[in-house]
Amino acid sequence: MRKICLRKFAAVFLAALIFISGCGYTTQSLLPTEFKKIYVDNFVNKIKVTDESSDARMYRGYRPGMEIEMTRKIRDKYVFDGNLKVANREDADLILKGELVDFRHEALRYDRNDNIEEYRVRMVVNMELQTKDGKTRWQENNFAGESLYRTSGPLVKTETQAILEAEDDLARRVVERTIEEW
């Protein structure tokens, strides 16, 4: 009888120990501790707006100032995240450089009369994260943020709302890429 109680106690103790230790998830940065500040350089517009239209480019587009708004949202997301402080170039440990290379407005769903019911807005950037001495920590090409929107029904959104959501999605992904170093 005493062996059974001891075994039950050991099993409960082991289960409690596993429960208390958790799964190992953390919201802390996985960057080395020497990186505390980041400078986000202004993203550059590299979209070729003068290219001729084709089937592949049919839903490409550009809105003036998108790269400026994207840069601002990425900076804001670093501030919100709090793992890296946004700083001036001279004070920063890391420098993020980027360029907006594509903006797509793609039709996804049509009704039976071939009217577009749903679109995807997609922003694509090339980025590079460097240390203050110019060494590249990582480089990502064709990194994207996106949003879907419908033109009718209960989930209707405007294209402007979808663009703002795509910028938010991109900013979140950029910060995660930096902090989690995956």
Image: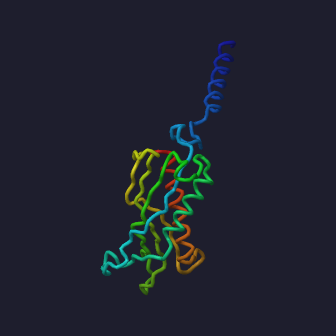
Residues 154 and 75: in front is 75
Q: Looking at the image, which residue is at 56% across and 78% down?
A: 158
Q: Residue furthest front?
A: 90
The colour style of the image is rainbow
Image position of 27 with respect to 115: above or below? above
The number of callouts visible is 0
Classify residue 88 as left or right of residue 125: right
Classify residue 15 as left or right of residue 66: right
Image position of 17 with respect to 141: above or below? above
Q: Looking at the image, which residue is at 34% across and 76% down?
A: 57
Instruction: Examine the image and state in which quarter residue 15 appears.
Output: top right
> Which part of the image, by quadrant, shows the N terminus?
top right
Q: Position of residue 173 (x, y in %)?
A: 50, 56
Q: Position of residue 21 (x, y in %)?
A: 62, 31
Q: Position of residue 108 (x, y in %)?
A: 43, 74
Q: Looking at the image, which residue is at 48% across and 77% down?
A: 63
Q: Residue furthest bottom?
A: 113
> Which part of the image, by quadrant, shows the C terminus?
top left
Residues 176 and 93: in front is 93
Residues 13 and 174: in front is 174
Q: Looking at the image, which residue is at 47% across and 46% down?
A: 132
Classify residue 178 as left or right of residue 58: right
Residues 20 and 143: in front is 143
Q: Position of residue 4 (x, y in %)?
A: 66, 17
Instruction: Examine the image and state in which quarter residue 142 appears.
Output: bottom left
